[in-house]
Image (cartoon, helix red, strand yellow):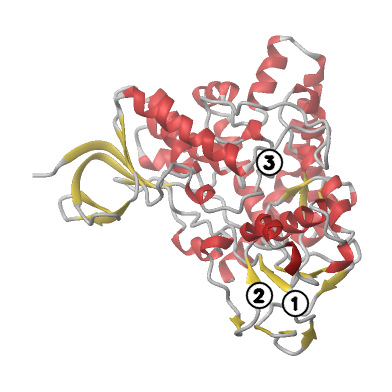
Amino acid sequence: MADLETDYLIVGAGAVGLAFADTLIDEDPDCHITFVDKHAKPGGHWNDAYGFVALHQPSGTYGVNSMAFPSEQIDTHGPNKGLFALASGQEVLAYFERLMNMRLLPTGRVAYHRLSEYLGRDDNGVATIRSILNGGETTIVIRRKLVDATFYQTSVPSTHTPNFEVAAGVDLAVPGDLPALWMEPDTLPERYVVLGAGKTAMDTVVWLIQAGVDPDSISWVRPRESWLWNRDYTQPGKQFFEQVMSMQLALLRTAGEAQDGAEWMRKLGEQGYYLRIDESVEPEMFHYATISQGEIDILRQVKDVIRMGRVSALQPGKMVFADSEVSMPASSLFIDCTASAVPFEARQRSGPLFREDEIVLQPLHVPVVTFSAAMAAFIEAHFEDDNEKNLIASPGPLTDTPATFPYAQMISMMNRGAWSQKPEIMAFLARSRLDNGGPVIAELMAENSPRLSILEEFREAAQQHMPDLIRLGMQAKAIHEAD
């Protein structure tokens, strides 16, 4: 006989699992949910992130549907000035802890097993979880479904194992170590060497410069350049409606002019919707990192950019690459920013979201993962047949390069098109805090606003250019599946 029973056992109490549960609790008032998670607090990888980490999307479109962040105002200073605030890592953790303790657990329909790991299910469908601290095991009957909220397998510097050799005597740090530099003012490094080209590396460079480090004292190993989403065009709220819609229109219209994903992104970059740090180098990477022009201006202050591929070894006084070496001062501090926020091996676990007695949460609108999880919960609560659910909830791919970007864009737009045919889904989107457009459009419709005329432009562009988007998307799909 099992120890406990639940309707949904959610493996992972990070942002994705919490967003799913938050919506399901409201949409299915009879269900019971149990979380099992290895961390001591809800929030997943945010528990392990570096101290100066912050959202790179507006706080107003992150988290869960039922609860706003305490401050979602417009920033009045700094590189994000004029745009909606970005919650710090500490704010995000506090938000998820408040969600669990003041919203979910008080319903009496949610159980939370922290510092525990999921061991699997037996032939009768009974799950076993084990306490990490005492080794005790608990069995749970799952009346409905197991929910896998670990698909993204987010990697952060503090839990990441470097893919390069580090010789004795080399000073290697992770970004989370940097705020403690003030404790040793007499032994500060002569040079700061940032390893990695992703958003963590960008955050680190911005932090170093804003903390007072001379940009000429920074070396930056960037194996690949990246296209970056211009944060100006990802803002929630009515005041940014035309800006957001202009990018959606540009996506469709430029699809008709491009021969492949790289050219498509290049055209969007020419119009300012996508940014890059070095405009003289063609980006080979795209991970949906979002950035402001103000941050770009700071990053461009670093002139010593090393493009020799990935580091294979760090030795006293030098970095070793596959075909070359670069000398560095002996007192250099190497900062490892090479962890991948989303390991692309996760694509091997991709497949349908709804799998009879299991749900594997994946992006439905790339890259907004918490919105996708909330959408999956709504679909689970309101549609009966898994085949029907999967028809309107195709998983979008985790794209790595401009070449595969159109595949994700195609899936996102096709899902959106399917949802537009379901009145109950459209009503949900109109009230969904996590959907960047739904509530704004609903509010403008209630006002009978003439600003809605841009939606007619979008419909016309969609009718004209969806074949172009599908052409690019299918081409990118073949590249993605061949990788």
Callout 3: few (<14), some (14-19), or many (20+) C-alpha neighbours within 10 Å?
many
For the N terminus, the image quarter is top left
Earlier sequence position, callout 3 versus callout 1 = 3
In the visual, does 22 lie left or right of 186? left
Q: Nearer the viewer, residue 29 or 295?
A: 295
Residue projecting furthest to the bottom: 323
> Type of residue at label 3?
Gln
- 43 above or below 191? above
N-terminal-most mark, 1 or 2: 2
Instruction: Mark 2 and mark 3 in contact? Answer it, CB < 8 Å.
Output: no
Q: Position of residue 429 (x, y in %)?
A: 57, 26
* Above/below status of 99 relative to 439: below
Instruction: Tell me what residue is drawn at x 83 percent, y 54 percent.
Output: 212
Q: Does label 2 or label 3 sit earlier along the sequence?
A: 3
Q: Amino acid at mark 1?
A: Ser
Q: Residue tagged by mark 2?
A: 171
Residue contact at pointers 1 and 2, CB within 8 angstroms = yes
Residue marked by disc 3: 57
- Residue drawn at the location 62% of the way across and 50% of the way down: 51
Q: Secondary structure at mark 3?
A: loop
